[in-house]
Image (cartoon, rainbow, N blue to C red):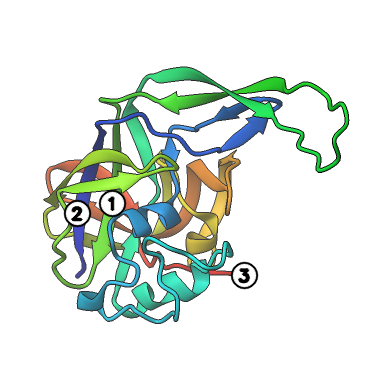
Amino acid sequence: MPQIYRCTLELHDSLYFATREIGRLYETEPILHNYALAYVLGLVDNPQLNTAVVEHPYCYFCAEQVPQYKAHLIPLNQQGIYVTPGWAVHYTTTLNTWKYADNCYHVEMKQTERNIPSFGRTKEIAPESLFEFFVITEKSLSLPRWVRIGKWASKAKLEATLLPIPQQHQAREINVSFPLNPLDVMFTNQILSYDTVNMPPVSLIRNVRMVGEFYTFEGLDLKLPAQMQYRFG
């Protein structure tokens, strides 16, 4: 049976990433994509896990702004590691306004247009907000205590609790309220109904009614879908 950690992530800075863009407003949805969490936890290109499979690992400099999700995450399947999307246990938001100027420079000595200031707004998740997610692994993991997340590399405190030994059940209908990655569950489970969470790079689903194998845990009211892996169409 796999080891399953219930993880909480407490923000110590405001968290920003553009889930959606509405005109000049850039909004952060209180959901953490499972692709992002794999990077945040240091599971991608981790020498201890033998997952260094790309020539240009993401560190302080990235020569190409091209996502390498498939190349980075498929090796985690070989290690028996999977991270679910994260959801907010409780959260508040802040609205920040930023300004910039349109600088028009010309080589020729002639009259130019004045700088026209412009602005935008970011809706961010405030400090002290708390997120939760699961890490499923075939072997023990040493997860970091502090991590950085989001566009601003916001500081967050990570706590991981090992759940009781899971009991696996045969396929039957279950309801899952927390978000899932549809690509990672639809090949081994039958999805009956769901709500969509639109966010890049792959939209997530929640309030899922599905038929499939699942885990339960003694003393906990929790059903976790089994056989989840990173999959790409």
User: Where the N terminus falls, by quadrant?
Assistant: bottom left
Secondary element at tag 3? loop
Percent coordinates x, y for residue 78 in the rendering:
34, 80
Residue 157 vertical position relative to residue 12 in the rendered view, above or below: below
In-image side of 100 versus 50 (left or right): right
The picture places residue 162, in percent across and down from the top left corner, at: 12, 54
Circles 1 and 2: CB atoms closer than 8 Å: yes
Q: Which amino acid, mark 3?
A: Gly
Residue 189, visible in the rendered structure: no
Disc 1 versus disc 2: distance between alpha carbons?
6 Å
Up-down relation of residue 18 to residue 127 (above or below): below
What is the quadrant of residue 55 in the picture?
bottom left
> Relative to 123, is 51 on the left or the right?
left
Q: Which mark is residue 233?
A: 3
Q: Residues within 10 Å of mark 3 (few under 14, many from 20)?
A: few
Local SS, label 1? strand
Q: Secondary structure at mark 2?
A: strand
**How many C-alpha atoms fall within 10 Å of the one at disc 2: few (<14), some, or many (≥20)?**
many
**How many labels, in total?**
3
Camera-side residue: 128 or 217?
128
- Asked if 136 appears above or below 176 in the picture, the reply is below
Q: Which residue is mark 2?
A: 5
Give the residue at x 44% y 57%: 35
The residue labelled by disc 1 is 134
Tell me which label, 1 or 2, sits earlier in the chain: 2
- The amino acid sitting under disc 1 is Phe
